[in-house]
């Protein structure tokens, strides 16, 4: 679990990984202003190992405010130009963000003030 003011309202918010008992699917849940946001759910049908063996290695991290290069902000863009056409090279965080990291990917969740919800970018595949 990590705590920070993710939405910029001056109140600490809480992010944590929750595990559904019925199928061991894992999700990232964030509580802000008394609202619960389900950011990610990883289950058998996702692009992860069907036996969930890599889920136990998932973790949450704290992303400091500032500039973050996305997966399309590096050499990947040169080789996958079409995939990166509508994808940002980087994002700038005004508030802390949430890193969801595993052996195969890293995602950065951050609060979008205009949309009043969390947005996400991939940092690596």
Image: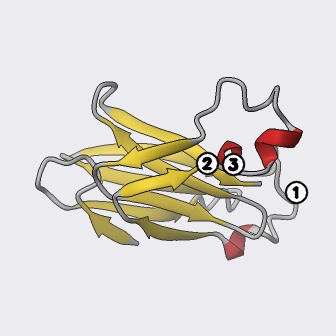
Q: Contact (CB < 8 A) between labels 2 and 3? A: yes
Q: Nearer the viewer, mark 3 or mark 1?
A: 3
Q: Residue 82 carries which label?
A: none
Q: Nearer the viewer, residue 90 or 60?
A: 90
Residue tagged 1: 50
Tag 2, which secondary structure? loop
Ranked by sequence position, the earlier of labels 1 and 2 is 1
Locate the C terminus and report the quarter of the image it occupies: bottom right
The residue located at (76%, 70%) in the rendering is 103
Q: Which of 102 and 45 is in front in this view?
A: 102
Tag 1, which secondary structure? loop
Q: Where is residue 22 in the image (x, y as percent from the top left)?
A: 66, 57
Q: Distance between the residues labelled 1 and 2?
A: 27 Å
Q: Distance between the residues labelled 3 and 1?
A: 25 Å
The residue located at (27%, 64%) in the rendering is 4
Residue tagged 3: 71
Q: Where is residue 59 in the image (x, y as percent from the top left)?
A: 58, 71
- Asked where in the image residue 113 lies, by quadrant, the reply is top left
State how many labels appear.
Answer: 3
Q: Nearer the viewer, residue 105 or 76?
A: 76
- Asked where in the image residue 66 lies, by quadrant, the reply is bottom left
Residue tagged 2: 70
In the displayed image of the protein, which residue is found farthest to the left?
10
């Amino acid at each position: 679990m990590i705590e920070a003011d993710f939405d910029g309202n001056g109140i600490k918010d809480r992010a944590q990984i929750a595990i559904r008992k019925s199928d061991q699917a894992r999700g990232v849940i964030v509580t802000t202003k008394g609202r619960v946001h389900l950011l990610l759910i990883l289950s058998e049908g996702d692009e992860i190992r069907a036996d969930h063996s890599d889920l136990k290695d998932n973790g949450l991290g704290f992303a400091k405010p500032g500039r973050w290069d996305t997966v399309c902000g590096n050499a990947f863009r040169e080789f996958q130009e079409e995939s990166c056409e509508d994808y940002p090279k980087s994002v700038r965080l005004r508030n802390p963000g949430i890193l969801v990291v595993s052996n195969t990917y890293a995602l950065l969740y951050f609060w979008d003030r205009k949309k009043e919800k969390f947005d996400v970018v991939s940092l690596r595949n």
